[in-house]
Structures are given as C-alpha cells and as structure tokens.
Amino acid sequence: MMINLSENIRAQRRAHSLTQQQLADALGVTVGAVYKWEAGLSAPDLSILVELADLFDTSVDVLLGYRVKSNKQADTVARLKAYLQNRDTQGLAEAEKALLRYPNSFEIVHQSAMLYYLFGLMTGEQPRLRRAIELMERSMLLLGQNTDPKISEISVTYDMAGAYMELGEAEKALELLKGSNPRGINDDVIGQYLAGYCDRPEEAEEYLSTALVSAAAMLIRTVMGYVNVYFKRGGILPPAPRSWSWRPGSSRG
C-alpha cells in the first residue's frame, strides 16, 4: 500500500505540473515531508490525504491505490482457481474469507479444499492437510450443487485419501479408497498402498492383478481409438497429446 501511495503522489504531482516545493506550500507542510512521501519513507496523515485527494481532484482510494474487488460468488471462485493455478499461498487467506461469505457453496468449499491440499502437499504442513480434509468432508455434503462433470464423490474421496496418506494414516486412506471403488477404479492405488505402506503383499497382489487387466484393456481401447481416428482423417496422424501435469483433483473423475 505504501509503495502505491508514494508512486501515486509523485505521479499526481507531476501530472499537475507541480514541484515538490509547490505541493508542500499548497498543503502547508515542509518540502522534506513531500520528499519522504514520494520516497516511501513516511505517509501523510489522513487529514493530509484528504487534502491531497481534493487538490488532485481524485479520491483517497485512488490515491492509496486501493481497488475494490468483486465478492460475487462467481468472481470469488475464479480468483480461488487462479490462486490454485498459480500456486499462490495468498489464496489461503482469500479462501477463509470466501468460506465466511459462502459457507454452503460447493464451489467455494471445494476450491478452498484444493488450495489447502495443494499447499499441504507442497510444504508437508499437517494443519493444512487437516484443513483440506475437513473442507473435503464438508464439500461431500454439498455435492448436489456440483455441475462440474470432472468432480464427483469418487474424485473428492480420492483426494481425501491422498491427504491421509501424506499424514501417514495409510489405513484411513485405504478405508476411503475401498469404500469408493466402483468397477475397481482405485485398484491400482489400493494395491500400491497395501504393498508399499502396509506390508500386505498378498492382499496388494489381488488389487494389482485386476488393475493390470483393466490397464491393459484401457490401453487396447486407446490404441484402437487412435487407429480409428487415423483412418477417419484419411491416414493423417493426430497431433501429439499435450504433456500431462498433476494438480489436486486431476486423477479421478
């Protein structure tokens, strides 16, 4: 805020073709005071700020560089998504404010959960992961509002299990994954957790075997799909797929 104020005072003074001395005389202050304002070494009192705004024919908000942001739900969701995309930790504070305004909005609660999950994974901070789980559980109660086909009870459960795994609570993660595993969609992860974290190789093999069969079938379908695309395009190869990048919620539909 101080940086914007100092820059704005200097810009407004120059726009009105005033020297620092002339501005000081107009306000009844010393030229040294004006110099400090513009250098960011000090800030004018509120009464002086009002006089400056009046002199420059502007508002105190503009002089301070303050911009009023929209707190409409759609705009808030868009900001939370941007914070997630940019991996900006300031999004956590924004998320808490949004949760106070819209405590029963699925989009707000889910996006806030994803922010805490991302930064919990990045830093390993348990309170952030615990907060992510709490918000994921709340979002499950609001799933009826969801309109994003990429988000479902399965995807939320999957992310919640990931948070528990990061906390070292493998059994809790397994309980969630096994309880939300239609058509064996989580078999690969369950098998990995059982073998790698729970020292239960026999049980892991059962899940990994079915996962391997499913993966092979998926690969065959994918290859056949590309073959069909190739011939439908008259023998022209399709463009290479974009490189895949991980983000919270991207692994399960």
Image (tube, rainbow, N blue to C red):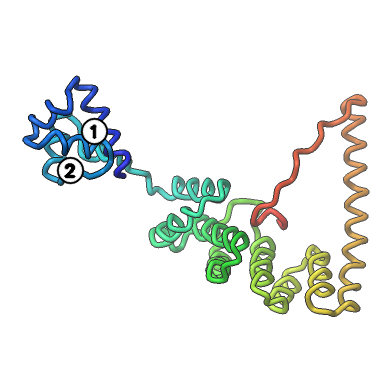
Q: Which residue sits furthest front? A: 32
Is 144 in front, or is 84?
Answer: 84
Q: Say above or below: 123 vs 15.
A: below
The image quadrant that residue 42 belongs to is top left
User: Badge 2 is on which residue?
Assistant: 44
Q: Which residue sits furthest top? A: 17
Q: Secondary structure at mark 1?
A: helix
Label 2 crowd bin: few (<14), some (14–19), many (20+), radius 10 Å: some
Q: What residue lies at 62% left-to-right and 62% top-to-bottom?
A: 121
Horizontal and vertical percent position of residue 250: 68, 53
Tell me which amino acid carries mark 2.
Answer: Pro
Could you tell me which quadrant the C terminus lies in? Answer: bottom right
Horizontal and vertical percent position of residue 176: 70, 73
User: Badge 1 is on which residue?
Assistant: 9
Q: Say above or below: 182 vs 249.
A: below
First-in-chain label (1 vs 2): 1
Indicate left or right for 177 with 26 as reference. Answer: right
Alpha carbons under labels 1 and 2: distance apart:
10 Å
Q: What residue lies at 76% left-to-right and 73% top-to-bottom?
A: 178
Q: Say above or below: 146 vs 4.
A: below
Is 178 in front, or is 118?
Answer: 118
Q: Are marks 1 and 2 in contact (CB under 8 Å)?
A: yes
Q: What residue lies at 88% left-to-right and 41% top-to-bottom?
A: 225
Q: What residue lies at 44% left-to-right and 49% top-to-bottom?
A: 76
Could you tell me which quadrant the N terminus lies in? Answer: top left
Tell me which amino acid carries mark 1.
Answer: Ile
Q: Which mark is residue 45?
A: none
Horizontal and vertical percent position of residue 181: 76, 68
Q: Say above or below: 197 vs 248.
A: below
Q: Secondary structure at mark 2?
A: loop
